[in-house]
Image (spheres, rainbow, N blue to C red):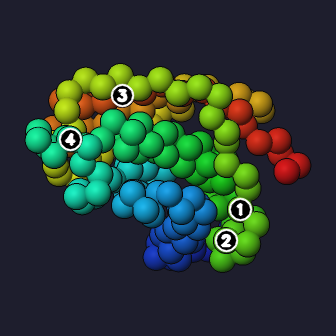
Amino acid sequence: MSWKKPEPVQVVKQRRDTALSALVESVPYMKFLGISFDRRGDELTAVLRYSEKIIGNPMLPAIHGGVTASFLESAAIVELGWAMIWDGIESGRLDPDALEQRLPPLPKTIDFTVDYLRSGLPRDAYARARVNRSGRRYASVQVEAWQDNRDRLFAQATGHFLMPSRDE
């Protein structure tokens, strides 16, 4: 009985990081806002780096509500996109270097509801999305955002997305 020797860990990590980078760079608005993603295995955490341009009310100061909504929606879309390409990356069928040229279309937002629980303070923010349901045509996602303490959310959202067809 023969078995295939496993790939070195650094090769697998590099493949995952390259694929995630290609996915995130496909949306220029995320770069404009300063949104990046921290990956641990298949779990993604969105990071919104603090900068003066994301402040909506300088008297408080507080993160602009539109920036907060965009941050949460970006976290949801990247989570869905990551879930779409994960199996291909892990099996080696999907070459991360070629992924930049032929990235699958990202899901399109049907509706997105944000609950603003408290003001976003002038510091880095973090968000995690959880896919509740993902089918061939439709996906439902919940997102939570926090700053210093994961138990003290400053915003949360629920979104529904139209999934791209497999042959696109």
- The residue sitting at 11% across, 41% down in the picture is 59
Circle 4 SS class: strand
* For the residues bearing labels 2 and 3, Cβ distance under 8 angstroms: no
C-alpha separation, residue under disc 4 versus residue under disc 1 = 37 Å
| Disc 1 crowd, CA 10 A, few/some/many (<14, 14-19, 20+) | some
Residue receiving disc 1:
103
| C-alpha separation, residue under disc 4 versus residue under disc 2 | 37 Å
Q: Mark 4: give few (<14), some (14-19) or many (20+) Cα within 10 Å.
A: few
Looking at the image, is 71 positioned above or below residue 117?
Answer: below
Residue 118 picture quarter? top left
User: What is the spatial separation of the Cα atoms under label 1 and label 2, in whole angstroms?
Assistant: 6 Å
The image shows residue 46 at horizontal and vertical percentages of: 38, 50
**Residue bearing mark 2:** 100
Instruction: Indicate the amino acid at tag 1.
Output: Leu
Type of amino acid under label 2: Glu
Q: Is residue 25 left or right of residue 149?
A: right
Q: Residue at x 63, y 34 (%)?
A: 109
The residue to which callout 4 is attached is 57
How many numbered callouts? 4
- Along the horizontal axis of the image, is 138 left or right of 118? right
Instruction: Measure how far apart labels 3 and 4 are at the Cα level.
Output: 20 Å
Residue 17 drawn at (x, y percent): 50, 68
Q: What's the residue at 16%, 46% (across, down)?
A: 58
* Residue 13 place in picture, x, y as percent: 48, 69
Q: Residue at x 31, y 30 (%)?
A: 155
